[in-house]
């Protein structure tokens, strides 16, 4: 990959010219597979970097030459690969595409598959634990999935929903590369992990996409009240709209509709207000020498400090630092 460092360069997983070592080490992260150079006598120059948090992994991989890749079928995880450089001719069951930096591929890995990477190809992989992703799907639709989740192969990254998904990946990538600290905060990391899974489920056509986009029932006021109590009692814990919906026995879409109809806000909007109130209460009694606004904001799940400060000022008429100093 030219002379530029790979993404996640500080988190190197393997760098080798040995095919067997590459298959073993890369396979630990992305699943067992076979790789062979296309040109007779050519040698690979494999390098993979990456990070893992929760049930998600982000990796960057290149081989330095044109290669044929044959992954083994498995049902433990799914992969999304975005070419950063080069192309990949992909065959996945009956589907065939040529993946480019504008067309990612979503690999369910439950069908026979073969891949031909161009020379110089470099891929950015997102790995999802299948059970965690299907649990997230269940929370969104309000029931346990009754068949394995499968996606269409090609993801058009020029479409707004896919661009939104990619932007979350880039946020995580920047955090990993700059040591921003968000991934070290369990509450924030859990929210980002859930957002990444939800964005994929809503953006990419799958065998559940119609139910995800259209199917929900109306939520009665008592259910909304139970959700409100749950939010207020567990605001300090990692919470997503899917967690709340599952706890009160409805789909995430139905809960969203119920909150809008009865409270004129979203569940996460209500949670944000509760957390802002808790942050203000904590800042009011905190010694400025013992803690910072950033410490308190992260502890209550606010990952973007600029948006947090703006929301705080809009709600309370002063900045968080003014509350802390006073």
Image: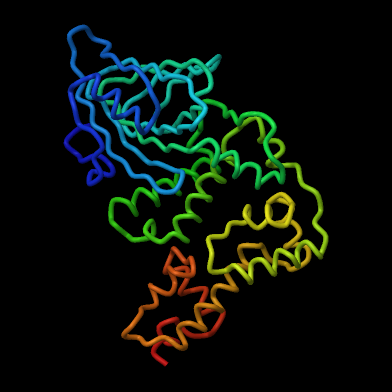
Please give the name of the residue rendered at 74% of the width and 56% of the height, measured from the top-left corner: 257
Place residue 115 in its image quadrant.
Answer: top left
Q: How is the image coloured?
A: rainbow
Relative to 132, residue 91 above or below: above
In the foreground, 102 or 69: 69
Residue 7 horizontal/vertical position (percent): 28, 42
In this rendering, position of residue 59 left or right of residue 217: left
Residue 100 horizontal/vertical position (percent): 40, 28
Residue 6 horizontal/vertical position (percent): 24, 39
The quadrant the N terminus occupies is top left
Residue projecting furthest to the bottom? 326
Please give the name of the residue rendered at 70% of the width and 36% of the height, measured from the top-left corner: 210
Relative to 10, residue 75 above or below: above
Residue 192 horizontal/vertical position (percent): 48, 53
The quadrant the C terminus occupies is bottom left
Relative to 301, residue 313 above or below: below
Place residue 43 in its image quadrant.
Answer: top left
Please give the name of the residue rendered at 47% of the width and 66% of the height, measured from the top-left corner: 302
In the foreground, 300 or 5: 300
Please give the name of the residue rendered at 27% of the width and 38% of the height, measured from the top-left corner: 49
- Total tally of numbered discs in the picture: 0
In this rendering, position of residue 59 left or right of residue 54: left
């Amino acid at each position: 990959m030219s002379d530029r460092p790979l993404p996640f360069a500080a988190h190197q997983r393997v760098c080798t010219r040995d095919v067997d070592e590459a298959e073993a080490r890369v396979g630990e992260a992305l699943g067992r597979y076979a790789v062979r150079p296309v040109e007779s006598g050519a040698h690979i120059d494999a390098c993979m970097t990456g990070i893992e948090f929760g049930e998600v992994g982000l990796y960057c991989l290149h081989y330095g030459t044109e290669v044929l890749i044959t992954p083994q079928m498995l049902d433990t995880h799914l992969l999304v690969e975005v070419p950063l450089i080069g192309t990949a001719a992909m065959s996945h069951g009956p589907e065939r595409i040529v993946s480019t930096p504008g067309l990612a591929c979503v690999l369910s890995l439950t069908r026979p598959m073969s891949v031909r990477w161009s020379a110089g190809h470099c891929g950015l992989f997102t790995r999802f634990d299948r059970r965690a992703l299907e649990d997230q799907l269940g929370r969104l639709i309000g029931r346990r999935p009754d068949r394995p989740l499968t996606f269409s192969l090609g993801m058009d990254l020029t479409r707004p929903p896919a661009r939104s998904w990619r932007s979350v990946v880039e946020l995580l990538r920047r955090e990993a590369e700059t040591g921003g600290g968000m991934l070290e905060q369990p509450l924030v990391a859990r929210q980002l992990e859930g957002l990444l899974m939800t964005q994929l489920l809503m953006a990419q056509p799958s065998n559940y996409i119609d139910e995800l986009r259209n199917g929900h029932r109306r939520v009665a006021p008592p259910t909304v009240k139970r959700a409100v109590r749950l939010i207020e009692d567990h605001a300090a814990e990692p919470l997503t709209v899917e967690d709340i919906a599952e706890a009160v026995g409805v789909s995430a879409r139905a809960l969203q509709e119920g909150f809008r109809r009865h409270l004129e806000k979203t569940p996460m909007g209500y949670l944000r207000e509760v957390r802002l109130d808790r942050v203000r209460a904590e800042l009011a009694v905190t010694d400025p020498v013992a803690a910072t606004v950033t410490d308190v904001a992260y502890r209550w799940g606010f990952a973007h400090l600029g948006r947090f400060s703006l929301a705080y000022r809009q709600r309370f008429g002063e900045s968080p630092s003014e509350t802390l100093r006073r």
